[in-house]
Image: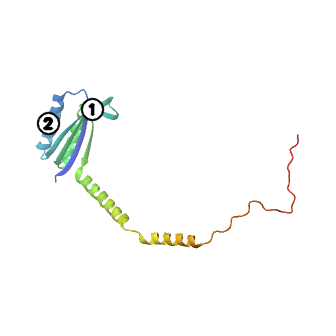
């Protein structure tokens, strides 16, 4: 059963353009000879790596979209692993990724639908509270100084 995969690999920066094209053609030939189909090849160019990989700070990024069986992908990954020119690679099964993205989108849509509904009850309750507070009379302000019969205490500092 053929499934869709994305294979991204990074090639050493000291590889020449002709060698890079030959490497890509070799992997594409492996896919087609194994019964798969190369849907697209995208050379993303030379980019800086986020961290040092095999003492390299940059490399050529290549993205292959492939429709193939799982056993063929395992063979391609083995060839990527043993190739000295490839310093890093990753394979993603796209049908699983598409399912995951559809699920996330469905969850987001339900959240938006829930929040889009007007909430009438709390608004009316808040308005009722405001009107009750407005009707209450304001208490008189307390006097600032109240006279008492008790003598005031004084504190004297010893010199």
Disc 2 element: helix
The residue closer to the viewer here, 157 or 66, is 157
- Seen at 19% across and 50% down, the residue is 4
The residue closer to the viewer here, 65 or 85, is 65
The image position of residue 70, as x and y in percent, is: 20, 49
User: Residue 25, labelled with which disc?
Assistant: 2
Local crowd size for mark 2, using a 10 Å CA cut-off: few (<14), some (14–19), many (≥20): few
Q: Quadrant of residue 147?
A: bottom right
Local crowd size for mark 1, using a 10 Å CA cut-off: few (<14), some (14–19), many (≥20): many
Looking at the image, is mark 2 or mark 1 nearer the viewer?
1
The image position of residue 144, as x and y in percent, is: 74, 60
Locate the C terminus by quadrant.
top right
Disc 1 element: strand
- Seen at 23% across and 53% down, the residue is 95
Q: Is residue 151 above or below residue 86?
A: below
Locate the N terminus by quadrant.
bottom left
Q: Is residue 119 above or below residue 3?
A: below
Q: Is residue 122 above or below residue 74?
A: below
- Seen at 69% across and 64% down, the residue is 141
The image position of residue 113, as x and y in percent, is: 33, 65
Q: Is residue 56 above or below residue 124?
A: above
Among the two numbered marks 2 and 1 on one chain, the one whose residue lies closer to the N terminus? 2
Q: Quadrant of residue 52?
A: top left
The image position of residue 128, as x and y in percent, is: 51, 73
The residue closer to the viewer here, 21 or 81, is 21
In space, the residues marked 2 and 1 are separated at their CA atoms by 18 Å
User: Residue 59, labelled with which disc?
Assistant: 1
Horizontal side, residue 134 vs residue 62: left or right: right
- Seen at 49% across and 72% down, the residue is 125
């Amino acid at each position: 059963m053929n499934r869709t995969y994305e294979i991204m690999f990074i090639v050493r920066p000291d590889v020449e353009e002709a060698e890079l094209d030959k490497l890509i053609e070799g992997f594409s030939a492996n896919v087609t000879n194994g019964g798969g189909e190369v849907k697209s090849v995208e050379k993303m160019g030379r980019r800086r790596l986020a961290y040092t990989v095999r003492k390299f700070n940059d490399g050529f990024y290549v993205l292959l979209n492939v429709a193939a069986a799982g056993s063929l992908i395992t063979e391609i990954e083995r060839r990527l692993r043993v190739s000295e020119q490839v310093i890093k690679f990753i394979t993603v099964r796209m049908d699983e990724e598409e399912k995951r993205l559809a699920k996330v989108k469905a969850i987001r849509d339900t959240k938006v639908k829930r929040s889009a509904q007007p909430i009438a009850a709390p608004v009316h309750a808040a308005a009722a509270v405001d009107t009750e507070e407005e009707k209450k009379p304001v208490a008189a302000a307390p006097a600032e100084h109240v006279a008492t019969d008790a003598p005031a205490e004084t504190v004297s500092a010893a010199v």
